[in-house]
Amino acid sequence: MESPPKNFLSPIRPTVRAVIFRNGELLVQVKKKTGQSPYLTLPGGKQEPGESATDALKRECAEEIGTEITVGPLIHVAEVFKPKEEGMRHQLELLFACDVPDDYLPIVGSHPDPSQIDTVWASPEKEATEFRPAYAHALAERAPLYLGVFDG
């Protein structure tokens, strides 16, 4: 068995994401890093040791989008390669269909990611090029469970 390339960080990181649709739009975080254009991501993040995937997703959404969510079925799995200063991060992302309360208005939660600047409803078709990873097309159509490999 070959070892992974030396520039890959270890271990592979389990990550959870919430896919929340309302009126054809997805609830997303707007993120901006210094010197880069803003981009859109699904709410969620790293699963901690001993934490179930659904508990991790509930925690991450409370922190980032400021609300409790209802976690539904697993709808997609994807692998994401994210460049980091110290090497390439390999993430295994679990995407769950989720719901927010009917009266939810997008806000930035009490403990957002450092690059998160907003939470908005966005069209996966009209704003597809702004999604990172590029999940928008897969989420807007009937895609397979395993989405494949994406650049982060």
Image (cartoon, grey):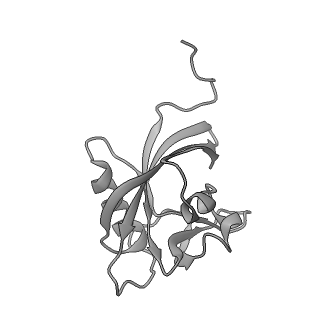
Quadrant housing residue 5:
top right
Residue 9: image location, x then y, percent: 55, 32
Task: Give left or right: position of 90 versus 66.
Answer: right
Instruction: Identify which residue is drawn at 72% across, 67% down.
Output: 37
Residue 10, position in %: x, y? Answer: 50, 30
> Is residue 116 found left or right of 108 in the rendered image?
right
- Nearer to the camera, 57 or 86: 57
Residue at the far bottom in the pictured view: 103
The residue sitting at 55% across, 54% down in the picture is 143
Classify 33 as above or below 67. Answer: above
Looking at the image, residue 95 sits to the left or right of residue 82; the answer is left
Question: Which residue is depicted at the point 54% across and 61% down?
Answer: 139
Number of numbered callouts drawn: 0
Image quarter where the N terminus lies is top right
Residue 102 rendering spot, x and y as whole percentages: 34, 84
The answer to whether residue 38 is above or below residue 107 is above
Above or below residue 88? Residue 73 is below
Indicate the position of residue 24 as horizontal and vertical percent values: 53, 77
